[in-house]
Amino acid sequence: ETGQPGGGLRLRVAGTPVLLEWTFLVWTVLIGATLGDPTLAVAWLVIVTVSILVHELGHAAALRGWGVPARIVLHVMGGVTTHEAALPTRWSRIAVSLAGPAAGMLLLGVPAVLVDAVWPAPDPWDDVLFLVVWVNLGWALVNLLPVLPLDGGHVAHELLDAGTRGRGELPARWLSVLTAGAAGAWALANGFMFGTVFAVFGVVYRYTVWLRRPPTAMLNRRGWAAFRSGTGRNLAAFP
């Protein structure tokens, strides 16, 4: 089922509505094309799509555990899980934020590491396994950095709120900018241009949100505002 113009494919996975935006598919295909191998390009498309979906389904499953329905959008910057009802406690919000990275690491990343350890994979399967590990462990660790709007940023915000009696937003923003800046400097020094660009985006994103001016219309609407229903709360963006 196709969505409206500028939308995408609407699915239901494990009982959760999913919107797969065309921008996500186009951007993922373009990145895969840079690998220089058609087999790896197809593998990249499948791995990234499945990995981000598993990550977001981890959030959705945790939300369902508290009786809160969720919706998932895969967009050009990764994925987002939204919900309308509020979670009951600070610790439930932290648990939901951590459930996404945990799902990808435990269901895909760690098994790929174990397979790689016991199976001398022939070409191109060795490269495929590397991509699975990189996406589900490498990206998951980055996603746990205390940088909003990443999952680690949400966890840091909640912990700072707990330690400052509800005044953790400003420290969380400063922590986001400083962490993203430090990560960008490290990535630049070590020749990781993608990491550098990602960190710069994190700094700019936090600064623009700080000024209440979202950087793009896409990030502002968060995928049709979660299928045009409810306000929702961003739990995860670019694993």
Image (cartoon, rainbow, N blue to C red):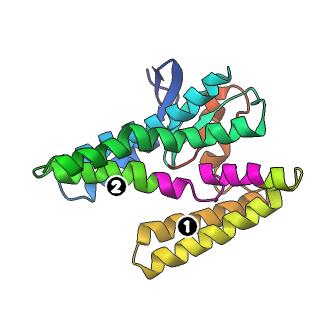
Whole-percent x and y of residue 17? Answer: 53, 23
Whether residue 234 is visible: no
Considering only vertical position in the picture, is 27 above or below 66? below
Tally of numbered discs: 2
Which secondary structure, mark 2? helix
Which secondary structure, mark 1? helix
Q: Nearer the viewer, residue 164 or 235?
A: 164
Q: Residue sitting at 58 percent across and 64 percent down?
A: 201
Whole-percent x and y of residue 114? Answer: 27, 46
| 13 left or right, relative to 146 | left
> Magenta span has 37?
no
Callout 2 crowding tier (Cα within 10 Å): few <14, some 14–19, many ≥20: few
- Looking at the image, which residue sits at the far left? 122
Disc number for residue 31: 2
Q: Residue sitting at 53 percent across and 28 percent down?
A: 4
Counting residues from the N terminus, which is met first, the one under dot 1 or under dot 2?
A: 2
Q: Amino acid at mark 2?
A: Ile
Which residues are the magenta region? 140-159
Q: Nearer the viewer, residue 172 or 215?
A: 172
Whole-percent x and y of residue 155? Answer: 68, 49
The residue under label 1 is: 199
Q: Nearer the viewer, residue 234 or 208?
A: 234
- Looking at the image, which residue sits at the far top? 15
Q: Quadrant of residue 107?
A: top left
| 18 left or right, relative to 214 | left
